[in-house]
Every structure is written in C-alpha cells, then in structure tokens.
C-alpha cells in the first residue's frame, strides 16, 4: 500500500492482488460466448481469460485516506449535483444526478446497509490493449460484511456503448475475484412506487433527529414486556407519550440507526407493523 498526495486530499493506492480472494477463479459462465449480454452479465467476457492475470497483477484501486468521495460536487454544474450528509457513514455524500441521490437516500434507510459511500473507489486496469479507469457511483457495505460496487444508470440506453460495457465487465470480474458484488442499477429499480420514494424521503430526513437515552430505555422496556412486534402509532406513543409527531420522528431516526424495521414500500399508518430489531 502507498499514499500519493493530490491537491485536495490524500489518495490511498492498493494493488488489486491484495484484495483478491483465492476462492474465486475465473467463472466458466464468463467464458461462454453464447451468453447474451445484459445488465447482470455486462457482456460475454470472451477475452477476459487471457487478460485475467493482468487484471490482478497490474490492476490498481484508489480510495481517499479519510474514506470519503474521490469526486466532489458543490452544485456548480449545469445539471443536478451536490452533497448530502449521511448519518450512517458520518460524512458527506457527493452526488451527481438524481439517480445517484435517490440511491444513497434509500441506502440510508435500508436495514441491510451498514454504510454507503458515493464516488468511493476508483479502478485502473489493463483490458483489451489499454488502461481503463472507472470510479464507482456507490460502494455499499452490508451488515453481513459483504461489499457491493454499484453502477447507476437512468435506463438501459446508457449501456449501449460496447467499449464502456467492456470496461464494466472488467470491473465486474475484479469485484468477483475480490469476493465483492458488482451491480448495475437502473433508476426505475430504486423505488418500487411513488409511495416508497415518499417514505424514504421522509424517514431519511429524520436521520439526525435526537434519540436520547430515555427513548432507548422506553424502547427496550417495551420490547422486554410486550415482545418485538408492535405498530407505528403504539411505539410512537411509547417513545414520546402524548406527543405523536415527536414519537414518530424518533421512530424514523431509529430506522436509520437499525433499531426498528418497517416496510417503507407501503403506506404508513398508525396500524402499520413495526418490529424492534
């Protein structure tokens, strides 16, 4: 591992080989030229067996020393961009395009996500006669310890360029060798409905709401006496007696903290089931 200084931040460079898990050899399905390209297999990787060793031996990855975004945005571009503070990650998320913003908001309230970071990791590797460079849209660390590298697209037309698909295929193979998951996510797949999106927007907006020790005592006492299953309205009353809006704000913050589970794809009423984690 080595560090190189840039104008704005310290960049940490590592060799791909240091991340490779020896259990993951080149998969046979990636060699099969009959496999049709799609979003799950970016393209048939018929040339990767020959280039596979170079992907590892000459490939590099770059992250910032502080763990934040390699690329930063301040809103001074012609299209949508900016930054957003994450409670889970405890740092800013720099985003470019509404698809990227929507995805990190969903990660913030996803109980399976430990943290997510935009623009977090850059890959450099030789493939098909030249060095390719790729910076992931989002890197996700799951609560089970697994890692996902996410490429976000508005629709499948954004994947029409064959050379770009080959770059993504190389990234997918590196991730597979490291035991990580590489996924292409389209904008319509982020939320299952408008209701889901509205709920995510609401719950993430409460991520920094105060959750005091008195709230945790009330939550734990309720779970001890009544079990882990309750409802949205009942728990709100437990957390903030006689002040339902305050109790619901605490519940919304507790979802971000992973202390409760609630299905955000449905309409939220006082009767909506809530499970204490």
Image: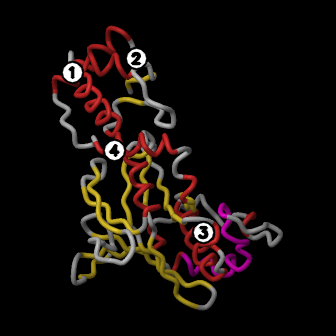
| Residue 42 covered by magenta stretch | yes
Q: Mark 1 to mark 4: distance in Å?
A: 21 Å
Asked if residue 6 lies left or right of residue 51, the reply is left
Name the N-terminal-most of marks 3 and 2: 3
Magenta region, residue range: 39-55
The quarter of the rendered structure image containing the N terminus is: bottom left
Q: Mark 3 to mark 1: distance in Å?
A: 53 Å
Which residue corresponds to mark 3?
A: 173
Mark number, residue 230: 2
Name the N-terminal-most of marks 4 and 3: 3
Residue 272, by quadrant, is top left
Q: Nearer the viewer, mark 3 or mark 1?
A: 1
| Residue 44 covered by magenta stretch | yes
Residue 122, by quadrant, is bottom left
Q: Mark 4 to mark 3: distance in Å?
A: 33 Å
Name the N-terminal-most of marks 1 and 4: 4
Q: Mark 3 to mark 2: distance in Å?
A: 44 Å
The residue most toward the bottom is 129
Q: Residue at x 58, y 67 (%)?
A: 172
Image spot of residue 58 (x, y percent): 50, 82
Name the N-terminal-most of marks 1 and 2: 2
Q: Mark 4 to mark 2: distance in Å?
A: 21 Å
Asked if residue 159 lies left or right of residue 233, the reply is right
Q: Nearer the viewer, mark 1 or mark 4?
A: 1
Which residue corresponds to mark 4?
A: 204
Secondary-structure class at tag 2: strand
Which residue corresponds to mark 1?
A: 243
Secondary-structure class at tag 4: helix
């Amino acid at each position: 591992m080595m560090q190189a200084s840039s104008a704005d931040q310290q960049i940490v460079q590592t060799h791909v080989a240091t991340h490779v898990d020896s259990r993951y050899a080149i998969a046979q399905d990636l060699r099969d030229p009959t496999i049709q390209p799609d979003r799950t297999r970016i393209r048939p990787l018929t040339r990767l067996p020959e280039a596979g060793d170079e992907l590892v031996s000459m490939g590099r990855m770059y992250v910032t020393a502080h763990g934040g975004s390699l690329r930063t945005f301040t809103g001074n571009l012609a299209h949508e961009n900016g930054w957003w503070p994450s409670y889970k990650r405890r740092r800013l998320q720099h985003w470019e395009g509404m698809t990227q913003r929507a995805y990190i908001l969903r990660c913030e309230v996803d109980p399976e996500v430990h943290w997510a970071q935009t623009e977090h990791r850059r890959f450099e590797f030789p493939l098909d006669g030249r060095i390719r460079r790729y910076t992931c849209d989002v890197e996700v660390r799951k609560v089970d310890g697994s890692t996902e590298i996410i490429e976000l697209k508005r629709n499948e037309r954004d994947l029409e360029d064959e050379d770009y698909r080959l770059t993504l295929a190389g990234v997918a193979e590196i991730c597979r060798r490291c035991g990580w998951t590489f996924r292409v996510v389209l904008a319509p797949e982020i939320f299952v409905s408008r209701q889901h999106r509205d709920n995510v927007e609401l719950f993430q907006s409460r991520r920094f709401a105060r959750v005091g020790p008195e709230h945790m005592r009330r939550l734990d006492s309720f779970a001890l006496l009544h079990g882990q299953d309750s409802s949205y309205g009942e728990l709100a009353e437990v957390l903030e007696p006689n002040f339902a809006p305050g109790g619901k704000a605490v519940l919304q913050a507790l979802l971000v903290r992973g202390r409760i589970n609630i299905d955000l794809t449905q309409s939220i009423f006082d009767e909506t089931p809530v499970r204490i984690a």
